Image (tube, helix red, strand yellow):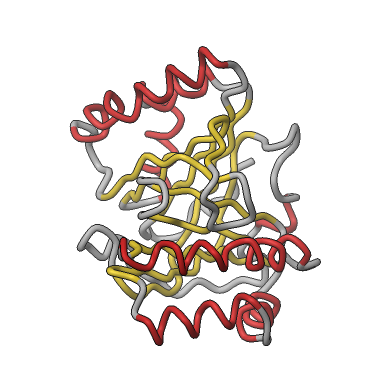
């Protein structure tokens, strides 16, 4: 399912592609791709930023890896170029061929602050719509605070998992324990803000991060969900009327 409107002017598009590798052989193969796929993206036209990521086994930040699920995040100048490369580039085709299922979300940044690998990859654009929104938090942890940070993770994961409003959540990252990304989808901004601000493990952890300056680098971004292709858990992640942006 792809929901671009042809009359829409070209705006930056972020693709988040998830792949599930169920067999040991496929997982060993994708481990090798952490080096080989870098060459493909380094020589790929149009892509302005990209990251190859593993995933965690919890709800958001997690210290335990999930070796079945891997991700590619990439930034493109327009939705047309994003779709063209995700659908036809060799690196994506190779990953899809080995995976038991895959999903790509196409996103428009609406707000962003902070940096990722010393760059500002997302260029926010005003997007009108009433559909769900996605949130991404990326952080580089200072090594000296790792024990303090990870002792708080189980309570945060439980709080996210029990929230009835969250439509989807996953933790990914470039380097286990040090570089972490949490990605979630919410019905609207109000439901996401309610979770972030209410008193509980998440709010306490945020306050501890600020007081102790635990992050060496951090980035927070929100996105409008413009479209999706593929499936996750055997079905499209969002129904058509949930992911459409007017």
Q: Nearer the viewer, residue 27 or 10?
A: 27
Could you tell me which quadrant the N terminus lies in? top right
The answer to whether residue 241 is left or right of residue 88 is right
Q: Position of residue 59 (x, y in %)?
A: 64, 55
Query: In the image, what residue occupies the spot 58% across and 31% down?
Result: 102
Give how far across and how far down residue 124 sits, in percent: 38, 70
Q: Nearer the viewer, residue 199 or 219?
A: 199
Please count the marks in the image: 0
Task: Reply above or below: 38 against 9.
Answer: above
User: Is 100 in front, or is 157?
Assistant: 157
Task: Name the one closer to the observer, 135 or 226.
Answer: 135
- Quarter of the picture containing the C terminus is bottom right
Q: Residue at x 61, y 79 (%)?
A: 196
Answer with the quarter of the image where residue 43 lies: top left
Q: Position of residue 135 (x, y in %)?
A: 53, 66
Question: Which residue does the image show at 33% across and 62% down from the upper left?
Answer: 140
- 95 up-or-down from 56: above or below: above
Pinpoint residue 127: horizontal percent, then vertical percent: 50, 71
Q: Is residue 94 above or below residue 206?
A: above
Residue at 49% of width from left, 56% of height from top? 107
């Amino acid at each position: 399912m792809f929901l671009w409107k042809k009359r829409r002017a070209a705006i930056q598009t972020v693709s988040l592609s998830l792949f599930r590798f169920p067999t040991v052989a496929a997982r060993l193969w994708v481990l090798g791709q952490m080096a080989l796929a870098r060459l493909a993206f380094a020589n790929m036209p149009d892509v302005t930023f990209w990251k190859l990521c593993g995933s965690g086994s919890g709800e958001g930040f997690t210290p335990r890896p999930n070796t079945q699920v891997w991700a590619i995040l990439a930034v493109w100048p327009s939705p047309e170029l994003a779709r063209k490369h995700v659908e036809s580039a060799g690196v994506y085709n190779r990953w899809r061929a080995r995976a038991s299922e895959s999903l790509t979300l196409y996103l428009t940044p609406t707000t962003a602050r902070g940096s990722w690998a010393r760059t500002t990859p997302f260029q926010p654009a005003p997007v009108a719509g009433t559909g769900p929104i996605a949130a991404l938090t990326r952080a580089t942890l200072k090594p000296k605070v790792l024990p303090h940070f990870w002792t708080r993770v189980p309570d945060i994961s439980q709080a996210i998992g029990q929230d009835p409003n969250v439509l989807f959540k996953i933790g990914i990252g470039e380097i286990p324990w040090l570089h972490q990304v949490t990605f979630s989808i919410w019905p609207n901004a109000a439901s996401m803000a309610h979770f972030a601000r209410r008193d509980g493990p998440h709010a306490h952890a945020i306050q501890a991060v600020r007081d102790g300056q635990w992050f060496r680098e951090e980035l927070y971004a929100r996105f409008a969900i413009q479209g999706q292709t593929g499936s996750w858990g055997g079905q499209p992640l969002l129904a058509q009327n949930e992911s459409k942006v007017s």
